[in-house]
Image (cartoon, rainbow, N blue to C red):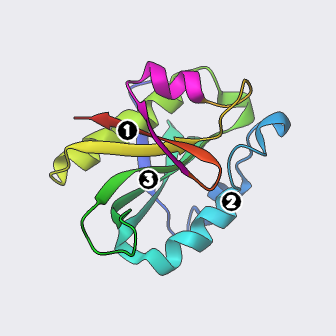
Amino acid sequence: MTSSLRLEKITPDNVDTAIALRVRPDQEHLVAPVVKSLAEAYPYGRTAWPRLIVDGDRPVGFLMAFFDIDFAAGGNGTDLRSGLWRLAIAAGEQGRGYGRFAVESVVEEVRRRGGTRVTTSWHPGEDGPERFYLGLGFRPTGESSGGQTVGESEL
């Protein structure tokens, strides 16, 4: 990785670049397309945090974090969580540390906002990213969301 690795806010200038990002064809069932993430981000307003991952002048991935979403049954405000909602590293850019950078960036943003844990979810199975998340310190909570394993990491 270069020292010019950074996150960029999604703007009118880079939205088409973000939408054009694609994971490997064999991974498409594991993560929603960027366009779906951006559509979901819109009604969530400041709760959603979509970002383009850029290395130098090259877009290499997309992430979307969330802040203070209520996981409690009935939405009573007793289980507010923040974490990584989506992560997609472009097909030709995988295995270079960009995913780790993305997760660490979300962890730092959650910490900066006063959070004490980071939540994410992943598709279970051999072809899913479970080993990646476990290697970064996430542990399954025993919950599932949309058929995905929910994991957390304490800060």
Give the mark toward the camera: 2 or 1: 1
- Numbered mark located on residue 8 in the image: 3
Query: 66 above or below 63?
Result: below
Left or right: 139, with 93 as reference point: left
Left or right: 87, with 81 as reference point: right
Per the model, the C-alpha gap separating discs 2 and 1 is 28 Å
Q: Which residues are magenta?
A: 130-144
Q: Secondary structure at mark 2?
A: helix
Residue under the point 74% across and 27% down = 127
Question: Identity of the amino acid at label 3?
Answer: Glu
In terms of sequence position, does the residue under pointer 2 or pointer 1 come before the other?
2
Q: Secondary structure at mark 3?
A: strand
Name the residue beneath numbered marker 1. 152
> For the residue carrying disc 3, how many other residues have a C-alpha within 10 Å: few (<14), some (14-19), or many (20+)?
some
Residue under the point 72% across and 23% down = 126
Question: Identity of the amino acid at label 2?
Answer: Ile
Per the model, the C-alpha gap separating discs 3 and 2 is 14 Å
Give the mark toward the camera: 3 or 1: 1
> For the residue carrying disc 2, how many other residues have a C-alpha within 10 Å: few (<14), some (14-19), or many (20+)?
some
Q: Position of residue 36 (x, y in %)?
A: 67, 65
In terms of sequence position, does the residue under pointer 3 or pointer 2 come before the other?
3
